Image (cartoon, rainbow, N blue to C red):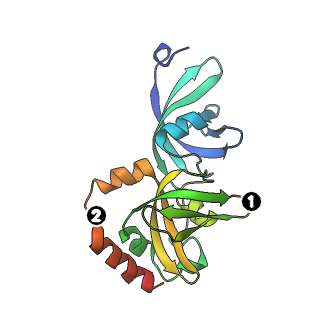
Amino acid sequence: MSVGDEQLREIVGVVKWFDGSKGFGFLTDPDGGSDILLHSNVLRNFGQSSVAEGAKVRAMVQNTARGVQAVEVLEIDAPASEPMPAIADLCSATPEEVARLPLLPARVKWFDKAKGFGFANIFEQKADVFLHVEVLRHSGFSDLTVGEAIALRVVDGRRGLMAAQVLSWERAAMEAKGPQLGGAAALAKLRLVAGAV
């Protein structure tokens, strides 16, 4: 069946589970129907390689011969969590302070979900930025792939630069359309907030 064969509808479902190595996962149906298939290709078209369990996903879905499937992801909201930092190293930075940090373009250098951490490189900078699995989960991801384009809000933690928030490249582009600090002002603000951590 092609996308046009069945009527599309918009839903907001919760990620029941997603396994990037299997290439799919499932969303709950807000109308109480059977689970909705979320294929990794549909998620990648949105700009993410993974999504955290419990995240809310706004998507276009359609009925197929194999059941209901997501055909387009429109928005992903991170799983509901306490209004506190994802890990102890960020404890002195409030969520509001983190949200005011500039978004910095980066690529994943490597990430090992089993170990719970990895590193990314900010474009045009040599230093590695530490990525913790709990920061990913608080940001709506469950895993990252090598070379994946992301945007980071970074603080200078006790052990060096670390991601305080991770966004998909597409979501960062949407947020960048609003007023953002740039250039020297962004770096000065980064140092100011990072120094408080």
Image quadrant assignment for residue 108: bottom right
Is residue 31 among what the camera can see?
no
Residue drawn at point x = 45 percent, y = 28 percent: 9
On the image, numbered disc 2 is attached to which residue? 180
Which label belongs to residue 53?
none
Residue drawn at point x = 40 percent, y = 75 percent: 97
Question: Measured along the vertical axis of the image, is residue 189 above or below residue 69?
Answer: below
Label pair 1/2, CB-CB below 8 angstroms: no
Question: Measured along the vertical axis of the image, is residue 46 above or below residue 66?
Answer: below
Residue drawn at point x = 39 percent, y = 54 percent: 172
Q: Earlier in the sequence, mark 1 or mark 2?
A: 1
Compared across the picture, whether 57 is left or right of 88 comes to: left
- Whole-angstrom CA distance, mark 1 to mark 2, is 35 Å
For label 2, the SS is: loop
Residue drawn at point x = 58 percent, y = 59 percent: 109
Specify few, some or many for label 1: CA neighbours under 10 Å numbering under 14, 14-19, or 20 or more.
Answer: few
Dot 1 amino acid type: Ala
Specify few, some or many for label 2: CA neighbours under 10 Å numbering under 14, 14-19, or 20 or more.
Answer: few
Q: Position of residue 192 (x, y in %)?
A: 37, 83
Q: Nearer the viewer, residue 129 or 85?
A: 129
Q: Position of residue 34 (x, y in %)?
A: 64, 31
For label 1, the SS is: loop
On the image, numbered disc 1 is attached to which residue? 114
Q: Nearer the viewer, residue 169 or 8?
A: 169
How many numbered marks, from 0 up? 2
Dot 2 amino acid type: Gln
Q: Position of residue 7 (x, y in %)?
A: 46, 19
